[in-house]
Amino acid sequence: MPVSVNFPYGKLIFFVTRNVNKFNEARRVLAEYSISVAMVKAKTLEIQDDSIEKIAEVSALNASREIELPIIVEDAGLFIEALKGFPGPYSSYVYRTIGVNGILKLLEGIEERRAYFKSAVAFCSPDGEIKCFQGIVYGRITREVRGSGGFGFDPIFEPDEEPNKTFAEMTIEEKNRFSHRARAFRKFAEWYKKTYLP
């Protein structure tokens, strides 16, 4: 049964995720815009699709119907050029099954290591309005795992902006300067501020 709460826009939005690391990155970016965010560990419907934008939008719409609050959902993927965009929208599953070492094994002997991370942040209002915002960061896959910070494929991705550091070797503040997720959340925050905040 949906939970209905009469909640004024602008005071707080709800990030539906079970990933505390994602939440912490998003919270810091949104704080730059004076937007408060709460983490909601609701289960979302995650479809299989080649588009992370579509996955985020469907998840957001589904979650919004359940909790009837202004919510955001984020989906992201690592796209490796030499692997024709793999793992892409299947990154979460691939990380759980073969992990970072599995990706490095797939790239053994391959010189071309260009890749990019893409993030899609979908906002859904209680009345079903959906907006999606995208962020991309380009870089390369390293030859070994480096760093203990971050999560997911962070230890094997060096962004072009910091070619000697993986995301896992950065603080959250450093990563948030140019990560795919930070870029998507900044686009969302700029739109949300103009649309809902006085």
Image: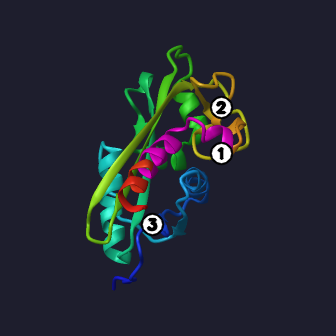
User: Magenta residues, as a range?
Assistant: 173-189
Q: Amino acid at mark 1?
A: Gly
Residue furthest out toward the top? 111
Nearest the camera: 196 or 41?
196
Residue indicated by mark 2: 166
Quadrant including the C terminus: bottom left
- Check contact, mark 2 vs mark 1: CB within 8 A: yes
Horizontal side of 158 relative to 67 (left or right) equals right
**Which of the two discs, 3 and 2, labels the residue nearer the N terminus?**
3
Residue indicated by mark 3: 10
Residue indicated by mark 1: 150
**Which of the two discs, 1 and 3, labels the residue nearer the N terminus?**
3
Q: How many marks?
A: 3
Q: Which residue is located at x 35 percent, y 57 percent?
A: 195
Q: Which residue is located at x 65 percent, y 31 percent?
A: 166
| Horizontal and vertical percent position of residue 157 | 59, 31
| Horizontal and vertical percent position of residue 55 | 33, 52
Q: Amino acid at mark 2?
A: Thr
| Horizontal and vertical percent position of residue 92 | 48, 49
Determine if the magenta segment contains residue 182.
yes
Quadrant including the N terminus: bottom left
- Check contact, mark 3 vs mark 2: CB within 8 A: no
**Marks 2 and 1, Cα distance to the nearest angstrom?**
9 Å
